[in-house]
Image (cartoon, rainbow, N blue to C red):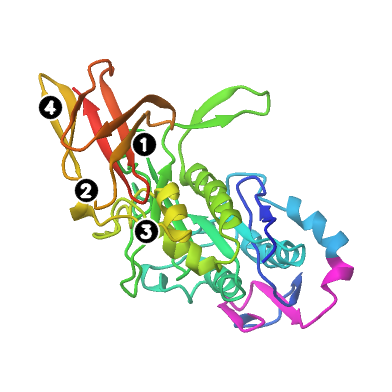
Amino acid sequence: MNSRITAILIGLLSVTGVFATTVIEQNDSITNEIVSDSITMAMPSDSITIQVTDTDSIARQQEADKNLLSLLETDSTEQILPVIKMLRMLEYADSIGADVITSSLGYSEFDDSRFNHTWDQLDGKSAFISQAAAMGVQKGLLIVVSAGNEGGNNWGKITFPGDVDGVLTVGAVSPNLKPAYFSGRGFTADGRIKPDIMGIGATAATITPEGNTAWKDGTSFSAPIIAGLTVCLRQALPDLSAQEIVGLIKNNSSQSLTPDSVMGYGIPDFYAAYRQGTGIEPSLKGDIPLQIIYREGIPIIKIKRLPIGETSIALHIYTLEGVIIQEYNVSENSETPLYTLKKGIYILAARCQSNYWTQKIQRL
C-alpha cells in the first residue's frame, strides 16, 4: 500500500466502491429489483427502472463522474434517488484511488413509504445502500459511516449502511463523554455490535462558510472527526489492511472488553491503537500501576509497583479537547497531588518505555 493515503470527504456525503455503471430512467414498465454487480434491491413495480451494464471503462468516465459528486440532496426531503446516485459516486471515488471513505448518508424512512426500511433489514445485506457499502469493504476500502441521528425518535436504531459488518459505524458523544440522546443504537438484526465506536458529535466544533466557529450536533460530525484520525492511523501503519486498522481501533476503545448497543466498543484511543499496531503492546487493564484517590476534591495520583524493567513513568494531563496542561515524571511508590487543576473532567495519560495507560480523572 502507498504510504500516501487518499481520503474522500464530500461535505456530509462520501462513499466508495467499484460497481457496474448504472443508467437511471423513469418509465412505466414493471420491474421488481435493481441489480448492480451482485447488488439487488426490491423496488415497487411503478417506480424507477435501473438498467445496469458491466463496463471496464471507468477511466473514460471519470471526468463525467466528477459532476455526480455535486448531485446531493438540496432540500430536507428524503428521496430514494440519492441512494441510487451513490453507486456512481462509489465508482468514481474508488477509481481515483481512495483508501478511506467517510459517509453521513443514512436512511431508515423515505417520503415514499414504499421504500421504508424495517428493523429486521438491519443485517448488513438487505438494504441497497448496505449492499453497496459491503462491496466497498470487500474490495479493501476503509469505510467510516455515521450511526445516524434516529436514537431519540421512533426508529431509535442506527441507519443504513451502518449495519454493514466491516464498516466503522460512529455514534456521537457529548463533551462529558456521555452518549448523545440522538445517536443511533444497535444491535443489528442479526445480533452484531453496532455502533462500533463513538466520537464527539454533540456540540462539535465546526467552521462556517464565513470562517466562524459554530457548535453543531449530529453523527454527521462525529463520523468525519473519527475518519480524520483513521486516515492518520492508516498512513502511520501502511502495511496493515483496512480491517486490521478497524480491529485496532475497536480493540483500543474504552469499552473494548464490554461493548454494548449504545456506545459499541466505546471511545477510541488512537495513540493506543498506533502503539499496538507498531508492536508496543498495551498492558492489560488489571496491570495498571495507577491509583486515583481524592482528598477534599483534589485528585492524587498514586504510583504503585511498575512493570519489570520500568524505572519511571511520565504523566500527561489533557483537557477533553486534547490540550496538555500538566506534565510530570514520577517514580514507583510516589504520590502526585493535582492541586492546580480547575474543576472539571480530564484525561490522564501515563507512559513508560514499553507501556502506557489512560484514565479519566475529575477535579471535584
Label pair 2/3, CB-CB below 8 angstroms: no
Q: Earlier in the sequence, mark 4 or mark 2?
A: 2
Question: Quarter-wise, where is residue 11 in the image?
Answer: top right
Looking at the rendered structure, the kind of residue marked 1 is Ser
In the image, 101: left or right of 158?
right
> Mark 2: which amino acid?
Ile
Mark 4 element type? strand
Disc sitting over residue 294 in the figure: 4
Which of the labelled discs sits on residue 151, or is there none?
Answer: none
Which callout, 1 or 3, points at the residue further toward the start of the chain?
1
Q: Nearer the viewer, residue 298 or 308?
A: 308
Measured in 3D between alpha carbons, the distance from the residue under mark 2 to the one under mark 3, in whole angstroms, is 13 Å
The residue that disc 1 covers is 174
Residue at the spot 64% in from the left edge and 55% down from the top edge: 14
N-terminal of the pair, mark 2 or mark 3, is 3
In this view, the mark in front (1 or 3): 3
Which one is in front in this view, the residue at disc 3 or the one at disc 4?
A: 3
Mark 1 element type: loop
Q: Quadrant of the C terminus?
A: top left
Q: Earlier in the sequence, mark 3 or mark 4?
A: 3
Q: Between residues 213 and 321, which one lies in front from this camera angle?
A: 321
Q: Is residue 152 visible?
A: yes
Q: Residue at x 46, y 60 (%)?
A: 277
**Percent of width and height locating residue 45:** 61, 79
Distance from the alpha carbon under mark 1 to that under mark 4: 25 Å
Between discs 2 and 1, the one toward the N terminus? 1
Residue that label 2 marks: 288
The answer for how far apart the CA atoms under marks 1 and 3 are is 29 Å
Does residue 36 appear to the left or right of 165 in the view shown?
Answer: right
Q: Which residues are magenta?
A: 35-61
Q: Is residue 57 above or below residue 295?
A: below
- The residue indicated by pointer 3 is 281
